[in-house]
């Protein structure tokens, strides 16, 4: 198994990985990027700790720290890992992750279930319209299947019976937090709550549109922010073919 790569893209939501592909294509033009997926079966109890330990088993085979990046619940996984094993992390980039990491689309959905009297299917359809806006990237019936699977498979601490909280705070490694001004889950005031936890050099950036999956709708824009951040930490990481992408 080769561990020769610069950046590790985390995915704890296999049913939603299609929304990562446009951004990964942008990033892969500039450096070597690997993907790590966590697959949780329906019979397993949801466990963020288990995912963190499996990720650590994987990264413990490397001799050098890695740049981690993840969206949503995958970003929460990266945040938790970076707090426990900072010596393994060169930097952490979070997309659509709140300063209270438990604020996820899953939590948003379960809150709505408590407030709105409608069927599971109808509420998922409403959630999809909120998360993606119009036009939708895929038929709504396919998106319902994907989100339903994510509720079952992602290592989320939430359930219909209980909404959890996770520890607030920053990390000791360099941090980039990206969000969208139109995200109904991690909306701008929630995103701004990161600022008290920032160190010198940490960055916060907001995409002007794109809702919760802004990295899917605006991969070039998000990719430029990631490249600038990583390039500022390690000028040898990004190719010099297009220096305007790497530096501000």
Image (tube, helix red, strand yellow):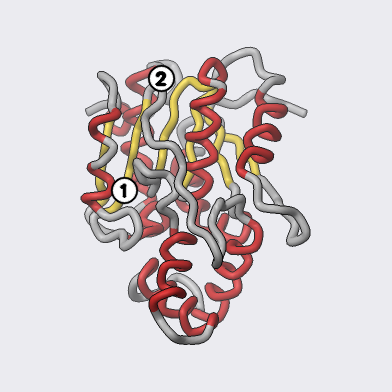
Q: Nearer the viewer, mark 2 or mark 1?
A: 2
- Label 2 element class: loop
Residue found at the far front of this picture = 161
State the residue in front, 137 or 71. Answer: 71
Q: Residue at x 41, y 19 (%)?
A: 172
Q: Residue at x 39, y 66 (%)?
A: 131
Q: Quadrant of the C terminus?
A: top left
Residue 81 x %, y %: 55, 30
Q: Label 2 belongs to which residue?
A: 172
- Label 1 element class: strand
Vertical relation: 188 (above or below) 184: above
10 Å neighbourhood of mark 1: few (<14), some, or many (≥20)?
many
Kindly tell me whether residue 239 is visible in this rendering. no
How far apart in space, not on screen, are marks 2 and 1 (Cα)? 21 Å
Q: Label 1 belongs to which residue?
A: 179
Residue 135 x %, y %: 36, 75
Q: Residue at x 56, y 51 (%)?
A: 157
> Which of the 4 quarters of the picture holds residue 198?
top left
């Amino acid at each position: 198994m080769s561990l020769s790569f610069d950046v590790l893209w985390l995915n704890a939501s296999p049913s939603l990985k299609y929304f990562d592909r446009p951004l990964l294509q942008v990033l892969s033009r500039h450096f070597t990027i690997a993907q790590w997926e966590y697959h949780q079966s329906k019979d397993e109890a949801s466990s963020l700790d288990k995912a963190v330990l499996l990720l650590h088993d994987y990264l413990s085979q490397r001799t050098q720290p890695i740049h981690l990046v993840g969206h949503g619940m995958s970003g929460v996984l990266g945040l938790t890992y970076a707090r426990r094993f900072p010596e393994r992390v060169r930097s952490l980039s979070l997309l659509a992750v709140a300063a209270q990491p438990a604020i996820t689309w899953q939590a948003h959905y379960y809150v709505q279930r408590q407030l709105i009297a409608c069927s599971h299917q109808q509420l998922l359809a409403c959630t999809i319209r909120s998360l993606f806006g119009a036009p939708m990237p895929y038929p709504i019936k396919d998106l319902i299947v994907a989100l339903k699977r994510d509720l079952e498979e992602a290592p989320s601490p939430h359930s219909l019976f209980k909404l959890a909280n996770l520890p607030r705070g920053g990390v000791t490694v360099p941090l980039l937090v990206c969000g969208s001004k139109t995200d109904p889950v991690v909306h701008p005031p929630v995103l701004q709550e990161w600022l008290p936890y920032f160190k010198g050099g940490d960055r916060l950036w907001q995409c002007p549109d794109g809702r919760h999956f802004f990295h899917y709708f605006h991969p070039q824009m998000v990719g430029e922010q990631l490249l600038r951040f990583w390039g500022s930490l390690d000028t040898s990481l990004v190719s010099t073919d297009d220096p305007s992408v790497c530096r501000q």
